[in-house]
Image (cartoon, rainbow, N blue to C red):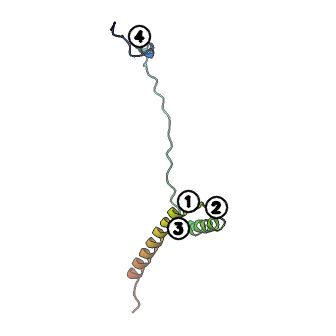
Amino acid sequence: MGRLPKWCSASCPQRAWEQTRAAASGLPAVQVVERHVETPVPILRPATDWPRLLGELVTQLDTGRIYNRDLNELAAALAAVDVAMTRRTYIRSRTAPRPH
């Protein structure tokens, strides 16, 4: 019932007025703002860091600084590391030069 509204919301007439005024003055109705966004890059650790980091893990486990609820996930990750180390050792032993 009644007349159809000309604007969809109360802010639309204001935006239309701003655009009309900007067009009349030759300026853009929208101000473009440029900004630089930094995205975090994963840190690739050198192989020499891992013994120290694993030592810190051992210390945290021994002192109870890791929650019991996190132990299953940690055990799965360490099992995957063990499998990868075993696989690497197997590959290395197969490609090593054999003594005559």
Q: CA distance from mark 3 to mark 2?
A: 25 Å
Q: Of marks 3 and 2, which one's residue comes earlier in the chain?
A: 3
Q: CA distance from mark 3 to mark 4?
A: 64 Å
Q: Residues within 10 Å of mark 4 (few under 14, many from 20)?
A: few
Residue 26 visible, this angle = no
Q: Amino acid at mark 2?
A: Arg
> From the viewer's perspective, is the residue at label 1 or at label 2 nearer?
1
SS under mark 1: helix
Give amino acid for label 1.
Arg
Quarter of the view holding residue 68? bottom right
* Residue placed under numbered mark 3 in the picture: 47
Q: CA distance from mark 4 to mark 1?
A: 65 Å
**Observer-nearest of 3 and 21:** 3
Q: Report the residue at 50% width, 62% height from top.
A: 73
Residue 24 in sight: yes
Q: Is residue 42 left or right of residue 97?
A: right
- The Cα–Cα distance between marks 4 and 2, rounded to whole angstroms, is 66 Å
What amino acid is labelled 3 in the image? Ala
Q: Which residue is mark 1?
A: 69
Say what secondary structure mark 2 lies in. loop
Residue at the extreme front: 1
Residue 46, position as x, y percentages in the image = 53, 64
Q: Closer to the N terminus: mark 3 or mark 4?
A: 4
Helix, strand or loop at label 4? It is helix
Instruction: Check whether the beta carbons of the residues at disc 3 and disc 2 lie within 8 A of each other.
Output: no
Relative image position of residue 77 (x, y in whole percent): 49, 65
- Identify residue for label 4: 24
